[in-house]
């Protein structure tokens, strides 16, 4: 079975995140999708909710969804989260021959050569690049060269070897942003149907991100 690590701040997790995870699960022939909230991202602003709150919302969101699970290792580490270090840990637990992939958007992949130990990452896992509208893959010495060297055209290629390839995908993405959700909560507007109901209830009942409204 292919294991796929889908990381992010999930601040909060929303239906866009979850729909992409379901699409990946189905497209990749039942791959196990591990949603992994980071504690402190190295290249983004710090999350508005605590790691525990984000983890609780994520677990509630995927509780009844087969094929999706939550990995809390980066939250438990209580430090800046680096992909290469996380992949090393996962390999120690699951072995060197288990097919493993990480997911990133085309916007983030364009600066892949700025990631911590970026050259080591393909030695641990495949890379799935999800194309985002407005963020075409840009030419450049790092990410573009890596894609030309390691790119594959079919999802089945991710099962042929345990790591080392790059698959670029077009997925039907929902145009939902966590920043917009937080802004809506702060201004007292509804976020119903942008997030799963268990997540909406937690935000509504605890007052996360602003006034106690939904």
Image (tube, grey):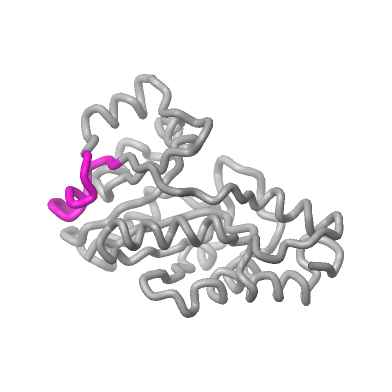
Residue extent of the magenta highlight: 153-167
Give the percent coordinates (x, y) of residue 59: 53, 74
Vertical order, 170 against 62 (above or below): above
Above/below status of 187 relative to 42:
below
Q: 149 or 46: nearer the eye?
A: 149
Where does the C terminus fall, quadrant-wise?
bottom right
Q: Is residue 177 magenta?
A: no
Q: Is residue 166 magenta?
A: yes
x then y, percent, for residue 115 = 44, 37
Rendering quarter of residue 204: bottom right
Would residue 75 be found to the left or right of residue 24 on screen?
A: right
- Residue at point 50%, 62% (across, down): 18
Spot occupied by residue 24 in the image (x, y as percentages of width and height): 36, 57
- Report the number of discs: 0
Please name whichever residue, 7 or 79, is drawn nearer the observer in this view of the structure.
Answer: 7
Residue at 50% x, 52% y is 81
Q: Position of residue 196 (x, y in %)?
A: 61, 69
Lateral position of residue 181 relative to residue 96, left or right: right
- Secondary structure mainly formed by the magenta segment: loop
């Amino acid at each position: 079975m292919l294991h796929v690590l889908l990381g992010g701040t999930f601040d909060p997790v929303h239906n866009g995140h979850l729909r992409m995870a379901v699409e990946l699960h189905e497209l990749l022939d039942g791959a196990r999708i591990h949603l992994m909230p980071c504690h402190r991202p190295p290249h983004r602003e710090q999350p508005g909710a605590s790691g525990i709150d984000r983890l609780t919302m994520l677990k509630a969101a995927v509780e009844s969804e087969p094929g999706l699970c939550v990995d809390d290792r980066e939250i438990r580490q209580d430090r800046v989260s680096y992909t290469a270090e996380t992949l090393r840990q996962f390999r120690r637990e699951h072995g060197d021959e288990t097919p493993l992939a990480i997911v990133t958007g085309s916007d983030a992949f364009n600066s892949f050569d700025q990631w911590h130990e970026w050259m080591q990452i393909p030695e641990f896992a495949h890379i799935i690049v999800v194309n985002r509208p407005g963020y075409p893959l840009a030419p450049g010495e790092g990410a573009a060269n890596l894609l030309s060297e390691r790119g594959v055209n079919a999802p089945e290629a991710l099962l042929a070897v345990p790591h080392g390839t790059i698959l670029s995908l077009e997925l039907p993405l929902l145009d939902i942003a966590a920043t917009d959700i937080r802004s809506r909560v702060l201004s007292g507007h509804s976020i119903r149907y942008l997030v799963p109901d268990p997540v909406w209830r937690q935000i509504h009942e605890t007052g996360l991100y602003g006034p106690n409204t939904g």
